[in-house]
Image (cartoon, helix red, strand yellow):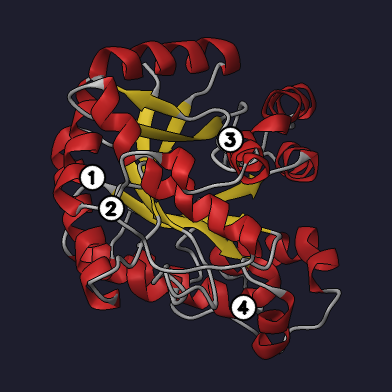
């Protein structure tokens, strides 16, 4: 049976604040644990007023402290923004606090705009070193060897499982070469999903962490009691994506009845292209969509974004998805 997990955006809503977004993320994790979700991940974003997950490791500690069994992790840490040693220290510390529950997904993109990249103080070519940086993180999380002069304390020996994240074929090739599980971001980059999965599986080399390929597929799913209600809830995410094409990034907004009044024909085409693999509807519609996606991709796991404005409605969406 295909596992279900959650990608939590830690969205800040209009009329609310970052603290409420962080507490809502923790509350969602508590409910998700009871509904049988395997893991909940948080992604690193910077300079985005509507997303409160910039200090990703801190957010994960907040979520993990409120739960008992669900896996908690980064989906992901944008490794070019950081020294691998520091990331190993952070996630090794999380693993000491919450043993057996921490995942570390690693991405190559900056997770922000170029002006903010300069503020992070990382070299412009940092992403070119991504493969070696992944190996460095892995080495610092492995048991220390005699005579090792630099250890990531208390990370050494925690062996936090690594994932490679991707929205292109580069990540697929790297995950296959290193023998790591692979998560594809088809919730915002749907066009390369199938080629990337095929490349990953065909080139996979077994490793100490993973004997055979394991593919996770990101997907937007919004569930409600009826197709009509779900389509209305989905306008929150549609407006957010359209705003990115306008060059504006704001807070999460309440859904609207008629999305056609919001966007231009060009913005509509761009937004629907980004959200092409979204599944929106009643439990029956959602189940059919999930079955079709799993059959098409052979996904071992789905990681779900349900970008709904109202927290109670978002909880209900994830509950319906789990029971669908």
In primary-sequence order, the first of circles 4 and 2 is: 4
In primary-sequence order, the first of circles 1 and 3 is: 3
Residue 110 in the figure: left or right of residue 142: right
Q: Name the residue nearer the viewer: 155 or 194.
A: 194
Q: Name the residue nearer the viewer: 104 or 242.
A: 242
Residue 46 in the figure: left or right of residue 284: right
Q: Position of residue 204 (x, y in %)?
A: 73, 29
Q: Secondary structure at mark 3?
A: helix
Q: Secondary structure at mark 1?
A: helix
Q: Which residue is mark 3?
A: 272
In primary-sequence order, the first of circles 2 and 1 is: 2
Measured in 3D between alpha carbons, the distance from the residue under mark 1 to the one under mark 4, in whole angstroms, is 36 Å
Measured in 3D between alpha carbons, the distance from the residue under mark 4 to the one under mark 2, in whole angstroms, is 37 Å
Q: Position of residue 43 (x, y in %)?
A: 48, 60
Q: Using the image, tell me which numbered label, if any, was put on residue 309.
A: 2
Residue 168 in the figure: left or right of residue 47: right
- Crowd rating for badge 3 (residues with CA inside 10 Å; few <14, some 14–19, many 20+): some
Q: Which residue is mark 1?
A: 314
């Amino acid at each position: 049976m295909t596992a279900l997990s959650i990608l939590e955006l830690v969205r800040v809503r209009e009329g609310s604040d970052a603290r409420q977004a962080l507490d809502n993320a923790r509350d969602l994790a508590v409910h998700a644990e009871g509904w049988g979700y395997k893991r909940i991940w948080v992604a690193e974003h910077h300079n985005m007023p509507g997303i409160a997950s910039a200090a990703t490791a801190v957010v994960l500690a907040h979520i993990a402290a409120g739960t008992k069994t669900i896996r908690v992790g980064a989906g992901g840490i944008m490794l070019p923004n950081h020294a691998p040693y520091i990331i190993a220290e952070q996630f090794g510390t999380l693993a000491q606090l919450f043993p057996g529950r921490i995942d570390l997904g690693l991405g190559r993109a900056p997770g922000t705009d170029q002006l903010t990249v300069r503020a992070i103080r990382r070299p412009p070519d940092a992403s070119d070193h991504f493969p070696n940086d992944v190996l460095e993180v892995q080495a610092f999380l492995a048991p220390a060897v005699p005579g090792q002069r630099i250890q990531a304390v208390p990370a050494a020996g925690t062996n936090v499982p690594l994932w490679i994240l991707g929205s292109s074929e580069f990540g697929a090739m790297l995950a296959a070469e290193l023998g790591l599980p692979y998560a594809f971001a088809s919730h915002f980059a749907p066009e390369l999903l199938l080629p990337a999965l095929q490349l990953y599986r065909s080139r996979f080399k077994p490793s100490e962490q993973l004997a055979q390929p394991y593919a996770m597929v990101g997907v937007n799913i919004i569930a409600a009691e009826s197709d009509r209600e779900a389509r209305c809830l989905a306008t929150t995410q549609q407006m957010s994506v359209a705003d990115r094409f306008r060059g504006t990034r704001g807070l999460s907004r309440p859904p609207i009845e008629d999305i056609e009044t919001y966007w231009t024909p060009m913005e509509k085409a761009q937004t629907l292209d980004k959200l092409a693999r979204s599944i929106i509807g009643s439990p029956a519609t959602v189940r059919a969509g999930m079955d079709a996606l799993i059959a098409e991709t052979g996904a071992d796991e789905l990681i779900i974004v349900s970008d709904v404005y109202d927290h109670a409605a978002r909880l209900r969406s994830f509950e319906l998805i789990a029971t669908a």
